[in-house]
Image: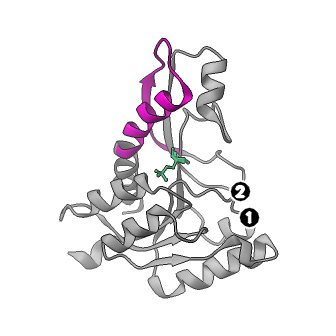
Amino acid sequence: MDDKKLNLAVFISGRGSNLQSLIDACRDEGYPAKISVVLSNKPDVPGLQKASDANIPAITVHHKDHNTREDFENAMLAALKDYEIDLICLAGFMRILTPHFVNQWPGQIINIHPSLLPDYKGTNTHERVLADGKTETGCTVHYVVPDVDSGAIIVQKRVPVLEGDTPDALAARVLEQEHIAYPEAIALAVKEKA
Ligand code: GRF
């Protein structure tokens, strides 16, 4: 059974709560994917500890050790080589991947973004949602294409914006839904590939 599971690489840059939601989902025998490796572009982040607590190989490719984006991406590609990865899951990975990397994995990279795309691409989504007086926001899991936050949508989850919300309060409400959306999206992506 295990051999038929999709091999995931999860890319992180920090806390790793979405990584944890994927680790937890993969504990279910019936879940159609397993995490083969976790890659961080920053050393010593909490997500790396979460990976090693779950006995998942954890690799750091520090972007600061590389002079160009292409060198950094080549180092990541080299690090992945031994893992027979089917799908790369960006989970709070804070580096923009260039076409050099993305085009080598067509339809095989997905990302989670804390807004209802195509609205609020980029950073500081919750601040901007509040500044615009929106009554609803959410999260999106989507395929990654060279244009940032623009690929086909796999799953979206909606949450209300409540009176008196701060960016942190809204982020926490959205994050709860992210932890549901990401495992769901991977299961759907597996079905699409079957
Ligand atoms: C999440 O809100 C994700 O949508 C965004 O960065 C945050 C990462 O959180 N891209 P975590 O590291 O998964 O806890």
> Which residue sits at x=35%, y=52%?
183
Q: Give the left or right position of residue 149, taking residue 15 as reference.
A: right
Measure the C-alpha gap from mark 2 to mark 1: 5 Å
> Which residue sits at x=77%, y=74%?
70
Q: What element carries label 1?
A: helix
Q: Mark 2 points at which residue?
A: 146
How many discs mark residues in the rendered view?
A: 2
Quadrant location of the C terminus in the rendered image: bottom left
- Relative to 41, residue 92 above or below: above
Q: Given the current orientation, which residue lies at the most extreme bottom position?
A: 82
Residue extent of the magenta highlight: 153-179
Q: Residues within 10 Å of mark 1 (few under 14, many from 20)?
A: few
Look at label 1 and name its amino acid: Pro
- Which quadrant of the view contains residue 20? bottom left
Question: Can residue 9 be seen in the rendering of this structure?
Answer: no
Look at label 2 and name its amino acid: Pro
Task: Examine the structure image and report whether residue 167 is included in the region drawn in magenta.
Answer: yes
In the image, 75 versus 184, the foreground residue is 75
Q: Give the left or right position of residue 112, taking residue 120 as reference.
A: left
| Circles 2, 1 touching at the beta carbon (< 8 Å) | yes
Q: Name the residue under label 1.
A: 99
Q: Give the left or right position of residue 192, taking residue 4 as reference.
A: right
- Relative to 173, residue 50 above or below: below
Q: Is mark 2 on a helix, strand or loop?
A: loop
